[in-house]
């Protein structure tokens, strides 16, 4: 088939497809369940999971005094292994000062600028990935627990719209793949349900650790839609909706995905 | 210094065959990948890995660009004496990294 | 737009395939995409001859373990193991791994000896394409043993483009 014909096909099919329906809570599956045995084994064994290298870096970073305040993460938060338990499972969370939800990356950078008086860490920098993986790991096995209150609701709704409405040159929505066609194959790869249970995670395609925003921008690019810059409120709203959609599912951070 | 992770038993019975797992952070740039201008990104890989047990070499590997980023290598040795396992990685652009773990043999 | 159910089913599958094709069409590079020549069966044979010389290459004793279907060619788990008592008199000296269609044939060359106890190692390798992988083991008596597997590398659908 020629490429223009293919485009017409996509448009024709999606025009005929039924509206997206939510996946029943009991039928939700982590991306882990769609992976090959060998890739699961890589996630299951910390000494085989390359993400562990970032976590080890973060154990050092956690203790390092930073910025003009000369404070370390540990100076305020103490031992991450006890005091950070469950924190990542609640993010993105509403931030009073900003009047909107922030994700874990933004939380770390607020700590850096306001508490440590240091420069914020760049998105996808080794340090920010390491710290978010380390904090995330402390919630491993705990259920994702996104507050759904009056503060959060408008942003959750914005995220839901972002997920379900068609966008981009292919006129696709996230939901068409991840609600309606999960379990099917896109080229050789299984389409997962799109639950962000393990971020930041080590993706074999990236050959490195990456954040949820990297993955979302990656998807949006594939849809030929606006992919938004790192830290954009649209991406945080989508992260929030996806985490709420995965509520109750166990945190796997730092996971491995193909 | 690159971050490395060694997983080997701290204790073993004399004569027991033990598994040693090693992981190290390294980009393993192949030298075959073009950059945005089409020129190949220069090769930057680990070329050699050596494991010594109380000073004697027990395993060595020559690595090529086909080894995945953040190289993972596992192998075996016979736990025959209490002592130290030393690990060394050598690579392009003067890269070196070392790590060691102790083992008690009973 | 009207359509019968059967056609809708079929076109839905098409949608998946074509969307992938579109993703691929956007100029997204393969992990190992190169302009240089790739290794060929000939250059792999040359690399093996470099190790083996004129000695005969026997089938058996060595076993190559790679998943039959590979999710991502960037990190493919690989284990090579040899049958050997691993004694002073009878052990595996070296194990080499080669590929047919990567940019160069050599993957890894491991040296081991009786102190290994077990002639086996694992690593993760890159595979640029569906191809043959060959392991060659050199025994302490100077003999060479080999195993080979054909692997299928499927290309990830949603490759990163920016």
Image (tube, grey):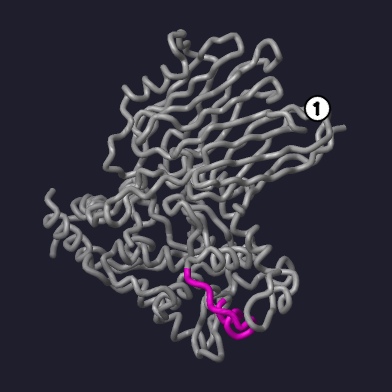
Would you identify the image quadrant in which residue A135 lies? bottom right
**In the drawing, does residue A96 fall left or right of residue C113?**
left
Q: Which residues are magenta?
A: A109-123
Residue C153 seen in render: yes
Q: Say if A65 sits above or below B59 in the image.
A: below
Residue drawn at point x = 55 percent, y = 91 percent: A97
Image location (x, y in percent) of residue B20? 68, 37
Image location (x, y in percent) of residue C22? 23, 55
Residue C13 seen in render: no
- Placement of the N terminus of chain C among the 4 image quadrants: bottom left
**In the drawing, does residue A123 fall left or right of residue B86?**
left
Residue drawn at point x = 43 percent, y = 30 percent: C106
Mark 1 Cα-neighbour bin, 10 Å: few <14, some 14–19, many ≥20:
some
- Placement of the C terminus of chain C among the 4 image quadrants: bottom left
Q: Which residue is mark 1?
A: B80
Image location (x, y in percent) of residue A207? 46, 51
Residue lying farthest right? B106
Decide which of A189, B25 is in the foreground and name it.
B25
Residue B66 forms part of the magenta stretch: no
Image location (x, y in percent) of residue C81? 57, 24
Would you identify the image quadrant in which residue B81 lies? top right
Residue drawn at point x = 80 percent, y = 25 percent: B15
Q: Say if A256 sits above or below B18 in the image.
A: below
Which chain is disc 1 placed on? B
**In the drawing, does residue C64 fall left or right of residue A187?**
right
Secondary structure state at the residue bearing disc 1 = loop
Residue drawn at point x = 12 percent, y = 55 percent: A5
Q: Say if A52 sits above or below C75 in the image.
A: below
Decide which of A67, B10 is in the foreground and name it.
A67
């Amino acid at each position: 088939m020629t490429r223009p014909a293919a485009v017409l096909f996509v448009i024709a099919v999606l025009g005929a497809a039924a509206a997206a329906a939510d996946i029943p809570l009991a039928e939700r599956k982590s991306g882990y369940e769609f992976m090959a045995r060998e890739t699961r084994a890589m996630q299951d064994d910390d000494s085989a999971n390359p993400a562990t290298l970032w976590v080890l870096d973060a154990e050092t970073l956690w203790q390092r005094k930073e910025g003009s305040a000369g404070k370390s993460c540990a100076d305020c938060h103490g031992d991450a292994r006890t005091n950070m338990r469950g924190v990542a499972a609640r993010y993105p969370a509403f931030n009073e000062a900003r009047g909107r939800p922030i994700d874990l990356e933004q939380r770390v950078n607020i700590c850096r600028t306001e508490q440590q008086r240091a420069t914020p860490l760049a998105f996808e920098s080794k340090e920010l990935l390491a710290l978010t993986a380390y904090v995330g790991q402390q919630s491993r096995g705990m259920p994702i627990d996104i507050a759904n209150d009056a503060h959060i609701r408008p942003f959750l709704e914005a995220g839901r719209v972002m997920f379900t409405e068609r966008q981009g040159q292919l006129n696709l929505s996230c939901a068409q793949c991840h609600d309606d066609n999960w379990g099917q194959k896109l080229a050789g790869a299984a389409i997962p349900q799109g639950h962000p249970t393990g971020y930041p995670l080590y993706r074999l395609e990236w050959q490195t650790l990456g954040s949820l925003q990297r993955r979302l921008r990656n998807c949006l690019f594939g849809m030929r839609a606006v992919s938004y810059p790192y830290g954009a409120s649209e991406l945080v709203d989508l992260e929030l909706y996806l985490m709420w959609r995965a509520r109750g599912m166990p945190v796997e951070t730092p996971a491995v995905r193909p | 210094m690159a971050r490395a992770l060694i997983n080997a038993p701290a204790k073993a019975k004399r004569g027991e065959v033990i598994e040693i797992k090693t992981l190290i952070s390294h980009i393993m740039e192949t030298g075959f990948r073009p950059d945005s201008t089409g020129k190949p990104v220069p090769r930057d890989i680990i070329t050699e890995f050596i494991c010594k047990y109380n000073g004697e070499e027990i395993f060595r590997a020559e690595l090529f660009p086909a080894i995945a980023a953040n190289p993972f290598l596992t192998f075996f040795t016979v736990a025959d004496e209490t002592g130290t396992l030393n690990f060394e990685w050598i690579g392009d652009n003067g890269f070196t990294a070392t790590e060691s773990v102790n083992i008690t043999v009973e | 737009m009207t359509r019968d159910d059967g056609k809708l089913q079929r076109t839905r599958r098409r949608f998946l395939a074509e969307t992938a094709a579109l993703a691929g069409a956007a100029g997204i590079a393969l992990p190992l995409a190169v302009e240089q020549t790739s290794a060929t069966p000939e250059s792999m044979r040359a690399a093996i001859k470099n190790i083996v010389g004129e000695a005969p290459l026997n089938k058996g004793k060595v076993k190559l373990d790679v998943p039959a279907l590979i999710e991502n060619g960037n990190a493919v788990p690989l284990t090579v193991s040899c049958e050997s008592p691993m004694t002073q008199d009878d052990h595996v000296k070296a194990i080499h791994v080669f590929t047919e269609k990567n940019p160069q044939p050599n993957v890894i060359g491991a040296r081991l000896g009786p102190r290994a106890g077990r002639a086996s190692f694992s690593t993760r390798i890159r595979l640029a394409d569906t191809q043959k992988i060959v392991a060659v083991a050199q025994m302490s008596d100077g003999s060479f043993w080999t195993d080979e597997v054909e692997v299928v590398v499927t290309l990830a659908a949603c490759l990163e483009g920016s």
